[in-house]
């Protein structure tokens, strides 16, 4: 059977790459080949950048209300096709339909914010800062921007990037993960259907060498990246060395602190979903539970709850989560599980041997829970990116805060308690960018920004929200004086006095 070929989007046209290197796009739940993606050639990358650069000259002149109306049409199309997008996304990622729908919806929310771009591009004015002198600022676009997106959220994360960048007046090159190119390409098709002018959005498929070429290209002004820590560090260093503005969202090790006064049922339900949802393959997953004082007795009940969560196919209503994205990802998680056992952690629940009837070739791992985990263990130090929960024990909230602040990552964390004083202390002293109080995964809504700290983020301005508008724009400050014309008699007097 001939597989469909995933096209590039170059200069407003969806076209197969002329390149010779192709990869199979597989359903990770079954191993079934869904499509073939041909990686772009160096000439095609240069063509994409040139097209985006040329399109910028006219797109930046389009009034912001017209750009906003493009976003309104786009979000309407996304909502109309939301279910189809979710099913496509579920097939190429293995996510359950519920997870896939959430992936699409969180992206739509950012597009809705982009539709209000005009008020976010307003500058500032100060009158009479000196006699007859006024100052005002203008917010103007940068030029050609680049987005490099991961496999785990193929709808949400591209929609974090290109709608806001384009609404600000930039043009954009999207380089999605070559593992999941179908959903981003469909997003681009709908964007063109909404009325995007030729050249404003380009889509390039490729791997590390293609990213390198894009990062070094002198006509790309800003780079937004979401992915793992080692790759994020490379992207950040390479792009900044080439004088680009950069935001890199990298790895995470997210903690949930459970106080003894917390609602136990709420805690158990929250931990189950936050640790295993999307098979643990999300940067905001809770991978560490810190039980304080008497709450340590709840760990076996958490294990019992996780045991009820079964992996399965995307259209199985009883499936709690899907497979890992690839055999390589599965092998890495299995290695970390075995390492945890060797290092002395107690594996109360082991999902290493999980299988799904009728999908034996899928990359399955069941819910796994360790107790007795210490900060020196590899399963604590590394981001596992699988449905694995590590449980730790401390005596006080202060000890929990100290443990989290000593971790190199700072993406997200949460506290479960009934005490307002404990919550206030936690949110004030914790050195993490996104904090949840009785909320396990505190991803901000798009009128705020996604604010990871420390090794979870490289750059200065964060994704979506007001910070993203500043990331995708420059500020121009203008100082003016308009003196009144001198009267002829005054001029003559001056000459005579000299």
Image (tube, rainbow, N blue to C red):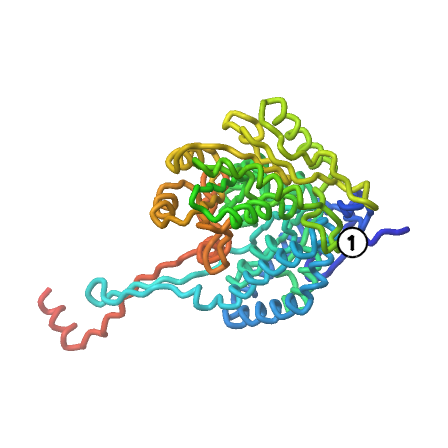
Task: Please name whichever residue, 18 or 450, is drawn nearer the observer in this view of the structure.
Answer: 450
Task: Please name whichever residue, 444 or 347, is drawn nearer the observer in this view of the structure.
Answer: 347
Q: Which residue is mark 1?
A: 16
Element type at marker 1? loop
On screen, residue 393 versus residue 43, left or right, reads left
Q: Quadrant of the C terminus?
A: bottom left
User: x, y (%) of residue 329?
Assistant: 69, 37
Is residue 218 something one can see in this rendering? Answer: no
253 relative to 80, above or below: above
User: x, y (%) of residue 102?
Assistant: 62, 57
Tell me which corner region of the image, top left, top right, bottom left or bottom right, holds residue 344: top right
Task: Please name whichever residue, 304 or 477, is drawn nearer the observer in this view of the structure.
Answer: 304
User: x, y (%) of residue 151?
Assistant: 66, 46
Is residue 257 something one can see in this rendering? Answer: yes
373 relative to 254, above or below: above
User: x, y (%) of residue 255?
Assistant: 50, 40
191 relative to 160, above or below: below
Task: Please name whichever residue, 406 or 460, is drawn nearer the observer in this view of the structure.
Answer: 406
Q: How many badges with numbers are in the image?
A: 1
Outermost residue toward the left? 497
| Residue at 59% in and 48% down | 273
């Amino acid at each position: 059977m001939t597989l469909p070929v995933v096209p590039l989007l170059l200069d407003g046209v969806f076209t197969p790459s002329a390149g010779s290197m192709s990869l199979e796009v597989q359903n990770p739940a079954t191993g079934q080949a869904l499509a073939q993606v041909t990686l772009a050639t160096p000439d095609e990358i240069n063509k994409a950048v040139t097209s985006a650069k040329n399109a910028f000259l006219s797109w930046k002149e389009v009034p912001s209300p017209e750009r906003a109306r493009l976003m309104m049409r786009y979000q309407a199309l996304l909502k109309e096709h939301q279910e189809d997008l979710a099913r496509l996304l579920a097939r190429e990622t293995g996510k359950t339909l519920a997870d896939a729908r959430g992936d699409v919806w969180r992206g739509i929310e950012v597009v809705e914010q982009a539709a209000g771009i005009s008020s976010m591009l307003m500058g500032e004015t100060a009158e009479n800062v000196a006699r007859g002198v006024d100052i005002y600022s203008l917010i103007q676009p940068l030029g050609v921007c680049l987005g490099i997106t991961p496999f785990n959220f193929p709808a949400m994360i591209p929609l974090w990037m290109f709608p806001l960048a384009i609404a600000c007046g930039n043009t954009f090159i999207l380089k999605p993960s070559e593992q999941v190119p179908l959903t981003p390409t469909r997003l681009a098709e709908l964007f063109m259907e909404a009325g995007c002018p030729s050249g404003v959005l380009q889509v390039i498929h490729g791997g590390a060498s293609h990213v390198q070429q894009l990062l070094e290209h002198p006509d790309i002004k800003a780079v937004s990246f979401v992915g793992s820590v080692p790759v994020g560090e490379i992207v950040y260093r390479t792009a900044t060395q080439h004088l680009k503005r950069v935001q890199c969202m990298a790895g995470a090790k997210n903690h949930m602190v459970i106080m003894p006064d917390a609602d136990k049922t709420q805690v158990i339900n929250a931990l189950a979903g936050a640790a295993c949802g999307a098979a643990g393959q999300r940067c905001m997953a809770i991978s560490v539970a810190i039980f304080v004082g008497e709450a340590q007795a709840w760990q076996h009940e958490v294990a019992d709850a996780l045991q009820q969560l079964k992996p399965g196919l995307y259209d199985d209503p009883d499936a709690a989560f899907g497979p890992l994205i690839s055999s390589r990802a599965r092998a890495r998680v299995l290695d970390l599980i075995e390492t945890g056992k060797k290092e002395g952690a107690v594996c109360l629940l082991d999902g290493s041997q999980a299988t799904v009837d009728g999908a034996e070739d899928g990359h399955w791992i069941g819910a796994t829970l360790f107790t007795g985990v210490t900060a020196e263990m590899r399963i604590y130090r590394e981001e596992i990116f699988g449905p694995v929960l590590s449980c730790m024990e401390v005596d006080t909230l202060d000890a929990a805060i100290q443990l989290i602040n000593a971790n190199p990552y700072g993406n997200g964390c949460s506290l479960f308690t009934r005490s307002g004083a404990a919550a206030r202390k936690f949110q004030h002293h914790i050195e993490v960018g996104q904090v949840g109080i009785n909320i396990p995964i505190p991803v901000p809504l798009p009128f705020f920004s996604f604010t990871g700290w420390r090794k979870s983020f490289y750059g200065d301005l964060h994704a979506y929200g007001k910070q993203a508008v500043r990331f995708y724009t420059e500020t121009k400050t203008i100082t003016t004086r308009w003196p009144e014309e001198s009267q002829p008699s005054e001029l003559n007097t001056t000459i005579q006095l000299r």
